[in-house]
Image (cartoon, helix red, strand yellow):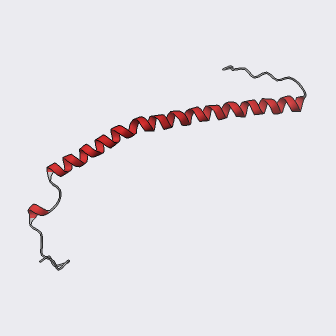
Amino acid sequence: MHPMTKRPAMPRSLRGFTVIQLMVALTIVATLTGLAIPSYRYITNSSRIAGEINNLLGDLQYARFQAIKQGQTITVCASSA
C-alpha cells in the first residue's frame, strides 16, 4: 500500500502513458493544428482589412468635418507625402 493514499500501489508498468498513446495524442494535436492555421490566417487578414477600412472612414469623416468648418471644398487623395 502507498502510505499517503492508503490504496495498493500500482505496478510500475501501469503508470504513465505508453509510446503508442503519446503518438496518437501527438497525431491528433498535429491534425487539429493543421486545420486551425488556415482559419487563423483568414481571421487575421479580415481583421487587417477591417482596420484599414475604418482608417479610411475616419479620414473621410475628418475631411468632411474640415470642409464644413472651413466652408470650402476638400479633396481627399491617396499620397505618401
Q: Tell me which corner region of the image, top left, top right, bottom left or bottom right, holds residue 46.
A: top right
Locate residue 75 relative to residue 1 in the image: left or right.
Answer: right
Single out the residue that lies furthest toward the right: 71
22 is higher (above) or lower (below) than 76:
below
- Residue at the (33%, 43%) spot, across then down: 32
Name the quadrant containing residue 26.
top left
Q: In percent of the image, x 43 and y 37: which residue is there?
A: 39
* Count of residue discs: 0
Residue closer to the observer: 31 or 11:
31
Q: Is residue 43 left or right of residue 26?
A: right
Residue 50 vs residue 19: left or right? right
Above or below, 16 relative to 44: below
- Depicted 80 relative to depicted 17: above or below: above
User: What x and y, as percent, mark residue 7?
Assistant: 15, 77
Quadrant placement of the C terminus: top right
Give how far across and how far down residue 27 sits, in percent.
24, 43
User: Which of the pair 42/80 is nearer the observer?
Assistant: 42
Name which residue lies at 57% across and 32% down.
49
Q: Quadrant of the N terminus?
A: bottom left
Q: Which x, y percent locates residue 18? A: 14, 53
Q: Residue at x 29, y 45 (%)?
A: 29
